[in-house]
Amino acid sequence: MGSLAGKSPANTYKSLLKVADETNGVSGTASQIEDGEGTSTCISVGDDNFKVKPQSDNTTTTFEVENASGSNLLTVDSSNSVVKVGTSQVSATTQLLTFAAYRLVPSASGTHMVVGLGALEYATEMAERTLGTGTDPSTSLNSTTTTDDYTNAIFPVPYNMTIDAVKVLSSTDTDTDTTLNFHLMSYDMVADGTTSDGDLSNGVVLADGQATSVDRNVLKSTDLTIQSSSVTSGKVIACFVENETNTDDINIQVQVKYHIA
């Protein structure tokens, strides 16, 4: 880095930084930092505040804090409206959502079975419920007198969120190889104080995937494909597993990594 020693201000003013308010200098109102010829930077300062705002273009590195070796510890990405933290540079609002089931018995092969939130033992803690036999789970549900059985399987979305990854661990309870299909879905849910409360509609596939040769001798790990990552607040999320082969008991854990948008 060069030195200004012995150099005239007339020759170095372009490299000098100053606040834009040349009358009051630094005050209670943030003033933009400019170079000596008046070119604005992305920084504004006041006596009690500091602001970074891109002048021309949003970037993935609008603001960065590094350790001594040059690894990012804090990054503000104004292109994607996300703040990343730590050496792994994950979103600062990253959360984990878990669906799981122990001894879930499909009602029939080729049927999408509801997976509960957390770890639930079916038959003793939660009744098995279905949502269609198509390629994907049904996009709506009006379960009338069995609506209560879905209570522990629905995640109400409190904020706009972005799905980053979905991982499934699965096994069955026999030596027979089976094929399992997985779906993570979002829905609109009625909540207007009527007898329709809990009805689901406008289903969207958020993520899906398949595991083959699943039996009790293995623990299959499957990374689902994200089909639609954005989920708006007020919707609900549900998870499903389908046994294409038979009705063997299914053990499943689904980890959803997401961040608040």
Image: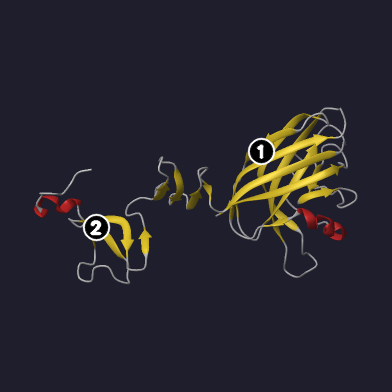
Instruction: Tell me the quarter of the image containing the C terminus.
Output: bottom right
- Say which residue appears at 79% left-offset and 39% top-offset: 242
Residue 180 appears in the rendering: yes
Element marked by disc 2: strand
Q: Earlier in the sequence, mark 2 or mark 1?
A: 2
Rounded to the nearest angstrom, the CA distance separating label 2 from label 1 is: 48 Å
Left or right: where 22 falls relative to 81:
left
Quarter of the image where one finds residue 32: bottom left
- What sort of colour scheme is used for the picture? secondary structure
Label 2: how many Cα within 10 Å (few below 14, some 14–19, many 20+) = many
Q: Residue at x 72, y 68 (%)?
A: 192
In this view of the protein, which residue sits in the foreground, 228 or 158?
A: 158
Which residue carries the number 2 mark?
34
> Along the line of sight, which residue is nearer the eye, 229 or 203?
229
Q: Is residue 116 visible?
A: no
**Direction from residue 167 to residue 246 in the image, left or right:** right
- Amino acid under disc 1: Leu
**Left or right: 167 in relation to 122:** left
Coordinates of residue 116 in the picture (x, y in percent): 78, 50
Residue sitting nearer the eye, 49 or 146: 49
149 relative to 55 in the view: left or right: right
Say which of marks 2 and 1 sits in front: 2
* Residue projecting furthest to the right: 124
